[in-house]
């Protein structure tokens, strides 16, 4: 049975919990996201230097919380050009309020996907 995730797509932010690759402790950040079917996309302005990215790629089992609902997921780097474009387009559509707003970030940030386990 597949859960309909559309009702979560409009959430302003999600909370991503990764396990610290050094500390072994959970770390939670608030971050913008976009959903496409069972895949959640985020962009890292700090690219691979961001601790959350390092943690998620080192230990890909992550938690996602949208509103009060918690999901398990598998994080991965987006490497396919088509999926890269999709992730950027979805996030731009959701958060870009005017032309030029967020443009540099949308172009240069590193896309990370979380495939939700439903």
Image: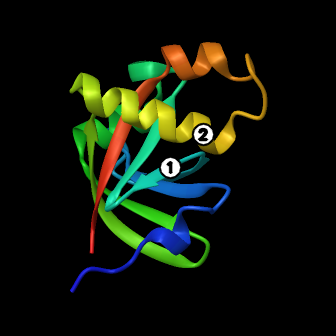
Give the residue displayed 68% in from the left and 23% down from the top.
102
Determine which of the numbered discs, if any, sits on residue 93 in the image: 2
Considering only vertical position in the picture, is 85 above or below 2?
Answer: above
Residue 81 locus on image (x, y percent): 26, 22
Residue 82 locus on image (x, y percent): 27, 28
Considering only vertical position in the picture, is 95 above or below 71?
Answer: above
Q: Which of marks 2 and 1 is nearer the N terminus?
A: 1
Looking at the rendered image, the quarter that the C terminus falls into is bottom left
| Secondary element type, mark 2 | helix
Q: In which quarter of the image is residue 13?
A: bottom right
State left or right for residue 68 relative to residue 111: right
Residue 107 locus on image (x, y percent): 52, 16
In the image, 81 versus 109, the foreground residue is 81
Q: In which quarter of the image is residue 55?
A: top left
Q: Quick one: label 1, few (<14), some, or many (20+) residues within 10 Å?
A: many
In the image, 111 versus 83, the foreground residue is 83
Give the residue displayed 45% in from the left and 74% down from the top.
70
Looking at the rendered image, the quarter that the N terminus falls into is bottom left
| Secondary element type, mark 1 | strand
Determine which of the numbered discs, if any, sits on residue 34 in the image: 1
Asked if the residue at tag 1 contacts the one at tag 2, i.e. Cβ–Cβ closer than 8 Å, the answer is: yes
Q: Quick one: label 2, few (<14), some, or many (20+) residues within 10 Å?
A: few
Residue 17 locus on image (x, y percent): 45, 56
């Amino acid at each position: 049975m597949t859960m309909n995730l559309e009702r979560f797509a409009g959430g302003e932010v999600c909370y991503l919990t990764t396990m610290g690759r050094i500390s072994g402790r959970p770390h939670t950040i608030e971050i913008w996201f976009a959903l496409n079917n069972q895949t959640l996309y985020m962009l890292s302005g700090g690219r691979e230097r961001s601790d959350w990215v390092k943690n998620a790629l080192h230990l890909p089992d992550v938690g996602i919380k949208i509103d009060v609902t918690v999901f398990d997921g598998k994080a991965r780097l987006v490497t396919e050009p088509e999926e890269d474009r999709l992730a950027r387009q979805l996030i731009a559509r959701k958060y870009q309020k005017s032309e030029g707003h967020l443009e540099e970030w949308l172009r240069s940030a590193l896309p990370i996907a979380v495939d939700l386990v439903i």
